[in-house]
Image (tube, rainbow, N blue to C red):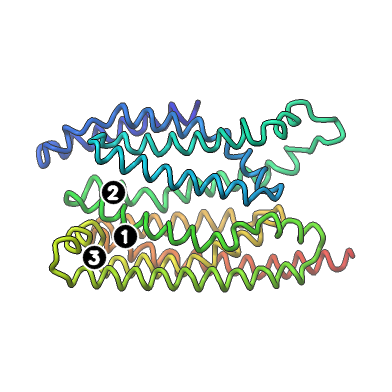
Amino acid sequence: MIFSVGASLAGIVFFRESAALTAELNPLRAQVQWVYPWIVLVILNGLQLPLLPMTAILEGCHQIAVVNRIRCFQAVIGTMVVWLAISSGSGLWALVGSAAVRLVGEGYLIGVRYRAFFEEFLCPADSSRIGWREEILPLQWRIAVQGVLLWLANQMPLLLIFTERPEGEAARLGMTWTILTAFQGGALAWIETRRPVFGTLVAEKNYVELDRLFFRLTRMSMFIMTLVTTFFCVAVWWMGSRSEGLFVRISERLLPLDATLLFSAAMVLIQFALCTNLYVRAHKRDPFLLASIASSLTVAGAQLWLGTLYGSTGIGLGYLLGIGCVQVPLWTLIWIQTRKEWHQIEAKHA
C-alpha cells in the first residue's frame, strides 16, 4: 500500500512537471495519455511485492527449477502481450499487460502450485519460530538501504536525460540499458541459481567445495558477459555503418557506439563484484553497507555531473568511472577480507 500510493504520487508529480516543461518543444509528448496506465502499473507491481519473499523461500527450498520454468513462461507470454498491445495501438498499456502476466505467474506459484506448503506458515509450531529481529532484520535493512541507493545510481540518470536532453535520447538510453541488463541477468543466472547451494555449503562449513564451485561459476559468468557485450558492441557498430532502412531504424533506437562501449565495459567490471556479493551474503551477513553508500553516491554523482555536460556519453563515462574506480575495488576488497577472516574463525572453532 505504501509503495503503491507513494510511487503513484511521485510519478504523477514528476511526469506532469516534465510534460509541462516540454509541451512547447514537443506538443506530441503532452498528448500522451499516461496517468491511468501509470497508476495501474504501480498497483500491479505493489500487489507483486508481498509475493517476492515467498518466491525467495521457494528458491531457498531448492525449487529453483520450477520457479525458473514459471518465469520462462512469464517472459514468453509477457513478450507476446506487449507486442499484441503495441500492434493494437494500446501504447503504454503494454507495460500494464506485462506486469499483469508477472503477477498472475507469481500468484499461480504461491496460491496454486505451493498453496499447501505456504498454508503451514499460517500456524507455525513454537519450536519452528526464528528470531526475525536477531537473524533476519540486520541483513534485511542493509539490503533495503542498498536497494534505494542502487536505484539512485542506476535509474536517476535516465530521468535526467528524459527532462534535460533532446527528444528520443532517453528512449535510446533506456533501450541500450535494458539490453545490457538482460545480458547481465542471463550471465549472472549461472551463479544466482546456486545461492541455496552456497548457503548449504556455508552451513556445513564445506569451504573447499564452496570456493571450487564459486570460482568455476564466476569464470563462466564473466566469460559469458564479456562475450555477449562484445558481440553487442560489434552489432551496434555494424548496424551504424549500414544504410539499409531496417538497420538504420534499429540503430536510431540505440545509443551510439562510444556510449555503448562505456556502459558495456562497466557491466563487465561489475559482474565480478555481483558474484562476490552473492558469495558473501551466503554467510547471512552483509558488510557492504558503507561501501554501497560510497559507491552508489559516487556513481550517481559522476553520472549526473557528466550527463549534464555530455548527455548519454557522459552518463556512460560516469558509470564506468564510478564502477571501475570505487565499487568494484571496494566490493572485491570486502570479499577478500571477509572470506579470509570468517573462514579462519570457523576453522579455529572447529
Taking 117 as reference, is 184 above or below it?
below
Q: Where's residue 280, x and y in %?
A: 66, 60
Q: Nearer the viewer, residue 133 or 75?
A: 75
In terms of secondary structure, where does tag 2 sit?
A: helix
Q: Where's residue 96, x and y in %?
A: 37, 34
Question: Residue drawn 38% across and 28% down?
Answer: 40
Q: Nearer the viewer, residue 145 or 167?
A: 167
In terms of secondary structure, where does tag 1 sit?
A: helix
Quadrant of the rendering where the C terminus is positioned: bottom right
The amino acid sitting under disc 2 is Leu
Sequence order check, earlier mark of 1 and 2: 2
Mark nearer the viewer, 3 or 2: 3
Cα–Cα span, label 3 and label 2: 18 Å
The amino acid sitting under disc 1 is Ile
Question: Residue drawn 49% across and 45% down?
Answer: 73
Mark nearer the viewer, 3 or 1: 3
Q: Where's residue 160, x and y in %?
A: 28, 48
Q: Are marks 3 and 1 in contact (CB under 8 Å)?
A: no
Read off the residue under disc 1.
Answer: 315
Taking 81 as reference, is 226 above or below it?
below
Label 1 crowd (10 A; few <14 / some 14-19 / many >=20):
many
Q: Nearer the viewer, residue 104 or 1?
A: 104
The disc label shown at residue 160, or none: 2
Cα–Cα span, label 3 and label 1: 13 Å
The disc label shown at residue 256, or none: 3
Sequence order check, earlier mark of 3 and 1: 3
Seen in the image, is 10 located left or right of residue 212?
left
Taking 95 as reference, is 39 above or below it?
above
Q: Are marks 1 and 2 in contact (CB under 8 Å)?
A: yes
As drawn, the residue found furthest toward the right would be: 350
